[in-house]
């Protein structure tokens, strides 16, 4: 006839799991499980814990828990009456504590999450009490909460870094000055020329020769001069004639009508 330890070890190996895996699933120390499989039941704990751990391990391995406990009692190693006495004493203290707590404060906080009630049985299970502990179903997802926190912090950091990077690129591109679209034919050395002078900032000035060729089209900054060739009559157009002057022979002339003296948006400088 197989011993208790042999049945436990055979059932565990038949399931294909290690001592450490069984310890993780049952929440019982691996050295206790190892001693059980070697028929060593003196684990320096009260009898209620020895029996509770043994029953939990047997049920986890799909063995009849009551049969294992009866075989353990038959060995005469434990003191059943002492176990029952401890059990009554523990629960007696629990009942007194609960009664005192209710009398002191009727609105006491709810019980810890580790204590669960099984519907239909009237039994309260406590993960910290081996007499009522029930192992969690094997194969469940077990994720370290610290790992989840670290992973969440890492993801948040990556998101913040990405947002800052996108913002930085957008700031750099928006601050980059855009070059205006300018058409400018510059006079050759020794070629006759006139200058377009910006009295104030001008958005657009257009200068064309007699053939309609655009010699200059673009803005003018205040104090800026743009020389263009003067080989024929030059026509200068702008919506703000008061901001532009013509430089000719070292003299500057406003874009005004010669008779009325009013600023005109289109002026023609005769050919040399």
Image (tube, rainbow, N blue to C red):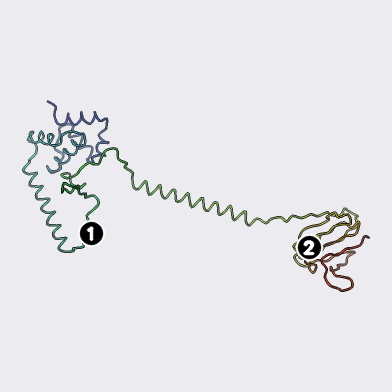
- As drawn, is 140 to the left or to the right of 249? left
Residue 100: horizontal and vertical position, in percent?
A: 14, 60
Q: How far across and down, in percent of the image, does residue 8 sit?
A: 18, 31
Residue that carries the numbered disc 2 in the rendered image: 224
Extreme-front residue of the structure: 120
What percent of the width, then of the height, locates residue 5? Answer: 16, 31
Image check: 194 left or right of 163?
right
SS for dot 1:
loop
As drawn, 236 above or below 122: below
Q: Nearer the viewer, mark 1 or mark 2?
A: 1
Between discs 1 and 2, the one toward the N terminus: 1
Compared with 210, 9 (above or below) is above
Q: Which residue is mark 1?
A: 109
Local packing at callout 1 (Cα closer than 10 Å; few below 14, some 14-19, many 20+) is few
From the viewer's perspective, is 104 left or right of 232? Answer: left
The picture quadrant where one finds residue 260 is: bottom right
* Image spot of residue 209 (x, y percent): 87, 57
Residue drawn at point x = 18 percent, y = 63 percent: 106
Checking the image for residue 14, the label placed there is none
Residue extending furthest toward the left: 81
């Amino acid at each position: 006839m197989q011993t208790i330890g042999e049945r436990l070890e055979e059932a565990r190996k038949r399931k294909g799991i290690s001592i450490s895996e069984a310890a993780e699933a049952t929440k019982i120390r691996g050295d206790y499980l190892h001693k059980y499989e070697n028929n060593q039941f003196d684990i320096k704990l009260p009898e209620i814990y020895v029996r509770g751990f043994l029953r939990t391990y047997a049920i986890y391995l799909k063995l009849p828990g009551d049969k294992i406990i009866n075989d353990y009692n038959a060995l005469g190693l434990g003191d059943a009456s002492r176990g029952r006495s401890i059990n009554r004493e523990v629960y007696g203290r629990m009942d007194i504590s609960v009664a005192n707590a209710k009398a002191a404060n009727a609105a006491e906080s709810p019980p810890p999450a580790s204590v669960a009630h099984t519907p239909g049985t009237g039994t309260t299970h406590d993960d910290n009490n081996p007499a009522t502990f029930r192992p969690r179903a094997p194969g469940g997802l077990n994720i370290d909460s610290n790992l989840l926190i670290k992973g969440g912090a890492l993801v948040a950091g990556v998101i913040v870094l990405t947002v800052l990077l996108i913002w930085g690129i957008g700031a750099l591109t928006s601050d980059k000055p855009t070059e205006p679209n300018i058409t400018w034919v510059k006079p050759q050395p020794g070629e006759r020329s006139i200058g377009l002078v910006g009295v104030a900032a001008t958005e657009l000035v257009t200068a064309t020769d007699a053939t309609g060729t655009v010699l200059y089209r673009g803005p003018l900054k205040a104090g800026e001069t743009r020389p263009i060739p003067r080989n024929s009559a030059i026509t200068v157009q702008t919506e703000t004639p008061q901001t532009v002057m013509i430089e000719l022979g070292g003299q500057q002339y406003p874009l005004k009508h010669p008779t009325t003296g009013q600023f005109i948006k289109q002026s023609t400088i005769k050919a040399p």
